[in-house]
Amino acid sequence: LRGKTANRDAMGARVNVTVDGKLQHRQLFTTKGYLSSVEHPLTFGLGSASKADKISIAWPGGKSTLLEDVKAGKTYVIDEVDGLVK
């Protein structure tokens, strides 16, 4: 995720991914506990599905982004303003 309005690293962004009617949720944080760190790319397991039906992002600045039919097995950059970059 690449933020523009609230913060460039999109810290605090909430992402929901729907696959075959099942919902997964992640929130982008810098850490999860004392002296720890968290990877910046958010990873979602889609099982044998070939795509995510829906990805919704609630950005820390208040904007939201909705993507549909996103192909599985790839790494994407999603920009707060420009949407899906690659």
Image (cartoon, rainbow, N blue to C red):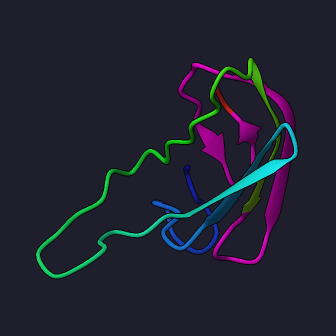
The residue lying at 16 percent from left, 82 percent from top is: 34
Q: Position of residue 7 (x, y in %)?
A: 51, 70
Q: Is residue 52 above or below residue 17?
A: above
Q: Position of residue 22 (x, y in %)?
A: 79, 49
Report the residue that reaches farthest toward the left. 35
The image quadrant that residue 12 belongs to is bottom right
The residue lying at 57 percent from left, 37 percent from top is: 45
Q: Which residues are magenta?
A: 58-84
The image quadrant that residue 49 belongs to is top right
Report the residue that reaches farthest toward the bottom. 34
Q: Position of residue 28 (x, y in %)?
A: 49, 64
Q: Position of residue 4 (x, y in %)?
A: 61, 61
Between 64 and 4, the one lying in front of the other is 64
The answer to whether 36 appears left or right of 45 in the picture is left
The residue lying at 59 percent from left, 75 percent from top is: 6
Residue 60 lies in magenta, yes or no?
A: yes
The image quadrant that residue 44 belongs to is top right
Q: Is residue 46 above or below residue 26?
A: above
The answer to whether 79 appears left or right of 42 in the picture is right
The residue lying at 33 percent from left, 69 percent from top is: 30
Q: Is residue 70 above or below residue 35?
A: above
Quarter occupied by the C terminus: top right
